[in-house]
Amino acid sequence: MDDPPAGVGAEGGPSETVIETDEATVTESAELERTIGLSGGLAIGIGTMIGAGIFVFPGLAAGRAGPAAALSFAIGAVIALLVALPASELATAMPKSGGGYYFISRGLGTLAGTIVGLSLWFGLVFATAFYLVGFGYYAVDALREVGFAVGEGIVIPLALLFGAAFTVLNVTGTENAAKLQNGIVALLLSILAVFLSAGVLTSLGVVGEPSAPEQFLPAGAGIGIVFSTAALVFTSYLGFAQIATVAGEMKSPGRNLPLSMVGSVLVVGVLYVLTIFVATSAFGATRLSELGETAMVAVGRELLGPAGALAIIIGGLLATMSSENASILSTSRAIYAVSRDGLLPSAASRINLKYGTPHVALGMAGGPILALTWTGRVEILAEVASFLHLVMYGLICIALIALRRDEPSWYDPDFRTPGYPVIPILGAVASFALIAFMQPLSRILGIAVIIGTAVWYVYYARDVNLKGAL
């Protein structure tokens, strides 16, 4: 009979974790509390994805692909869905903190697990820094809207301040962070419902004058620009995987994990496409590009006057705050899981006895996030985050195929991927293929991170034996 992987009991539930190394055998019985329900899982997924996709990217994406940016977002949603289905199956078989790292290390072994686990750490760090910079731009617009004459020089200081604040919030307890997430997402969706209703009616000419149709693709651009834009905006779809990183804290994971992961991709994908349609109808791609990261504020003012602009500013602040909060939470859980398995020093998996949170891991997440936020490089931050996650997504699909092939006795998921093996094969191919459309610098930085993680494996983790890894 095959042994279950470390941390998974005979029926997939939590158990004592055993890690074997050349130096010692470490028993880790501490587990994070299961406090997150379906609404919390959806809030993490939707709240993380909705920030960049709707409030930061429209101007940048329309500048590249024009109205066809809507197709770029749709492509991203399809790829995310192709991965969310296999990830849901793996998550119900192994409902443990760590998400993609945990699945890949148990399906493909310690080397792949080390590379993905550490890359997930840095991928989430890049993504969170991107969200924080977006928050800084919206905070400056908010101050201007209420009469404060401020320049863009305070964008980064504001982003750093709030990044530190959210790190502290997550230290005080997952339940506190989840409650904040639920409230933010509920208010955010209400704002978007009003905005998109007005925008769609205006775009179709039901209210006001219909807008003149714009050329779908920019003059002289080929279909490749649609895929390169999809590679840029794919950061918008990282939220569903972040649900898996807190699987160890989900109530009824067999039911709530698939519903949260697949549901969040579907909801947000529709919102993205509608938003790009509304934005390009209101202003056109060239004007949106000139407006940059806060183009949606001008769209809100065009559709609903000053109240619309204020609503979008509030929505942008809420969305980027939501993304930051969920990403910091997920980053720390990725570090916690890797450390608990002995691939990082054991201190990183210590749990604060007062709050029940991995406070050391949160510090290891918050520090690099603030350092990258300081650079302010929006597009590079977004693409490197996408690069590292796409590598993980492709390997998640491969891990599913490997586990289905070997069918270890402990592998008993509550959810099975429909269309197997076509879905995971398409998910792997699409994930790896999208990397080819990124900027050279983003690919170089992403490859450098992966090489660094492989070096760490050789230096520190090659003697670690994950019990039950294939």
Image: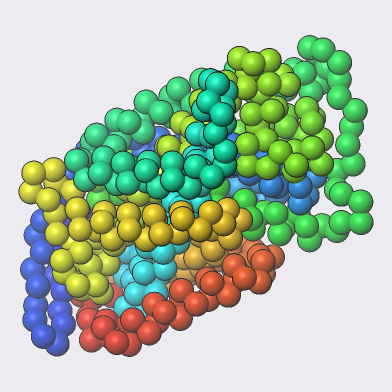
The residue at 32%/46% (across/down) is 164
**x%, y% of residue 218?**
87, 49
* Occupied quadrant, residue 455: bottom left
The residue at 9%/77% (across/down) is 25
* Occupied quadrant, residue 439: bottom right
Q: Is residue 25 visible?
A: yes
Position above or below: 40 against 7:
above
The residue at 85%/48% (across/down) is 217
Q: Quadrant of the image for the N terminus?
A: bottom left
- Residue 95 shown left or right of residue 237 in the figure: left
Q: Quadrant of the image for the C terminus?
A: bottom left
The residue at 54%/45% (across/down) is 153
Seen as rendered, the residue at the extreme front is 149
Query: By what rule are the colours in the image chosen?
Result: rainbow
Return the residue nearer the eye: 444 or 231.
Answer: 444
Q: Is residue 468 visible?
A: no
Position above or below: 215 against 247:
above
**x%, y% of residue 75?**
67, 51
Position above or below: 8 against 244:
below
**x%, y% of residue 54?**
60, 37
Position above or below: 342 against 416:
below
- Residue 88 shown left or right of residue 137 in the figure: left
Seen as rendered, the residue at the extreme top is 207
**x%, y% of residue 122?**
41, 64
